[in-house]
Amino acid sequence: MQKLEQVYEGKAKKVFQTDDPELYIVDYKDDATAFNGLKKGTIVGKGVINNQMTNRLMAKMEKAGIPTHFVKELSQRETLVKKVSIVPLEVIIRNISAGSFAKRYGVEEGIVFDAPTIEFSYKNDDLGDPLLNTYHALALKLATREEVETIEKYAFAVNEVLKAFWAECGVTLVDFKLEFGKLSDGTIVLADEISPDTCRLWDSKTHEKLDKDRFRRDLGGVEDAYAEIMNRLLSHDAD
Ligand code: TMP
Ligand code: ASP
């Protein structure tokens, strides 16, 4: 598979064309940002961990019947994926209060919800990814009603698979962000990444944060937390 012209560079990944028009190569960087790019840094080794973790978790999703863009891991930082056009919605599922939810509603972090919540942000850096509801998404023609329904169904299904797997690893899945894409035939698939950059993961016993909040909040031990969460995954993910 030949890596051709770069088509996109995001905050944490680059995307390249290949000699197959239906396939892209994603290349994970160690760059870390927070607060819409205001805070910048490097988490050494993050690209390798996020690549390998995402791929293992995407494979689990496929097994559970949730279609994804994942094709094949090519190297420590590179993965072959199906070409998609990203639906410009950030889909956030929460099981426990934290982050912007706690701030917005003036509640403490750590409240366990009776049922998971879902929310959407408009994926638009210039606007700071504003929150929106289904009516807004339809008005802005970001997706059709059927696509939003499919995305919601898959997002809650991802939550069940992820929550159960992380629980086996002694990790509580607090919340996470997903992105979905459309294949050239219109099929909706899970895309982007599932990693400590995009999930809040707490040690089930100590509630220690094992995710990017250590970077966002200057808690220290960022690289150690990424290594720890990857080790937990590897020791429970026999393949
Ligand atoms: P929030 O509480 O800041 O809204 O974040 C909810 C979840 O989404 C959390 O697991 C981190 C993840 N997230 C991203 O993946 N990218 C982002 O740009 C933001 C703001 C959050
Ligand atoms: N990746 C996001 C940014 O830089 C924020 C985050 O993950 O907190 O905007």
Image: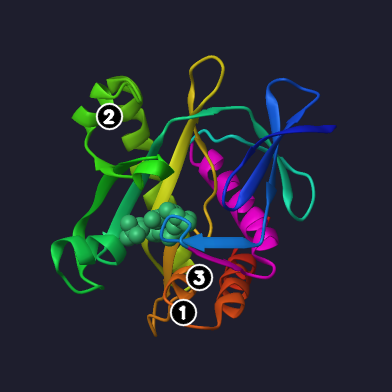
Name which residue type carries label 2: Ala
Residue that mark 1 sits on? 218
Identify the mark nearer the N-term, 3 or 2.
2
In percent of width and height, residue 197 lies at 51, 60
Find the residue positioned furthest to the left. 106
Inspect this view and state whether residue 30 appears.
yes
**Which image quadrant for residue 150?**
top left
Q: Secondary structure at mark 3?
A: loop
Q: Quadrant of ligand 1?
A: bottom left
Is 220 situated left or right of 105 in this image? Answer: right
Label the magenta part by its dominant secondary structure: helix
Q: Which mark is residue 137?
A: 2
Q: Are marks 3 and 2 in contact (CB under 8 Å)?
A: no
In depth, the one of 38 and 195 nearer the eye is 38
Identify the mark nearer the N-term, 2 or 1.
2
Residue at image location 49% in from the left, 21% down from the top:
187
Q: Which mark is residue 1?
A: none
